[in-house]
Image: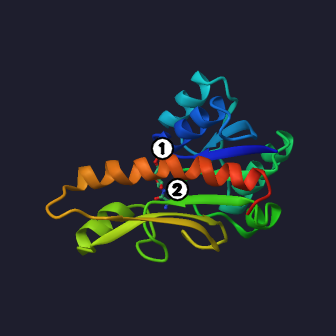
Amino acid sequence: MNFAVLASGNGSNLQAIIDAIKKKKIKANLNVVISDKKDAFVLKRALKAGIPTVVIDLKFFKSRASMDKAIVKELKGFGIDFVVLAGYMRILSSYFVKAYKNKILNIHPALLPLFKGAHAIRDAFDAGVKTTGVTVHFVDEKVDHGPIIAQESLRIKKGESLKSLEARIHKVEHKMYPKVIDFFAKGRI
Ligand code: GAR
């Protein structure tokens, strides 16, 4: 199975995926990393690991749909079977979702359907919930939405700082996402 990672930022999840592939904990090929941000650190991580990168920036397209057509074209060109969103901060058009129906995964740093959006860890922290966590789900046309595949919860400690919570959430993500990706690649989801 061949997959692509789409990401917009730091790429710590991509790094966890690359490390898991090296340790043979993911038995699938990561053929390309696509980003919508040309300066995203995630691209440096991909290049360092020798993985081809492509930048597809909305500003060069008339619409989100035409941007997604270009992405799907790249994915097909790289022989991609499934797509992994790892901090890709865009809503996918229905064209994209249909092209890879039930073959697009996303990770979100909260217990969906709670705290959707780009600041989930902070939003949960500010809301004062006692428990938050991480969700991996199939992607549809809505933000952080679609059938849930896996969730892990995490208790927010009394007096814990946001920084500490963020670090613990990311630690869970970095363990959980490679596992789910490997399961998916093996046809076990
Ligand atoms: C991760 O925490 C991921 O769950 C989150 O973006 C971060 C990307 O970090 N995704 C979302 O919030 C999706 N709504 P990374 O670039 O270091 O992997």
Q: Describe the element under mark 2 as helix, strand or loop.
A: loop
Name the residue: 40% across, 72% down: 115
Q: Which mark is residue 89?
A: 2
Q: Please identify the quarter of the rendering in which residue 67 is found.
A: bottom right
Position above or below: 58 against 39: below
Give the residue drawn at x 54%, y 58%.
107
Residue projecting furthest to the left: 159
Q: Residues within 10 Å of mark 2 (few under 14, many from 20)?
A: some
**Res. 9 mark:** 1
Q: Is residue 63 visible?
A: no
Q: Is residue 67 left or right of residue 131?
A: right
Residue 19 in the image, given as x and y percentages of width and height: 57, 32
Asked whether residue 151 appears in the rendered view, the answer is yes
Q: Are marks 1 and 2 in contact (CB under 8 Å)?
A: yes
Q: Residues within 10 Å of mark 1 (few under 14, many from 20)?
A: many
Please tell me whether mark 1 sits on a helix, a strand or a loop: loop
| Colouring method of the image | rainbow
- Total of numbered circles in the picture? 2
Mark closest to the chain's N terminus, 1 or 2:
1
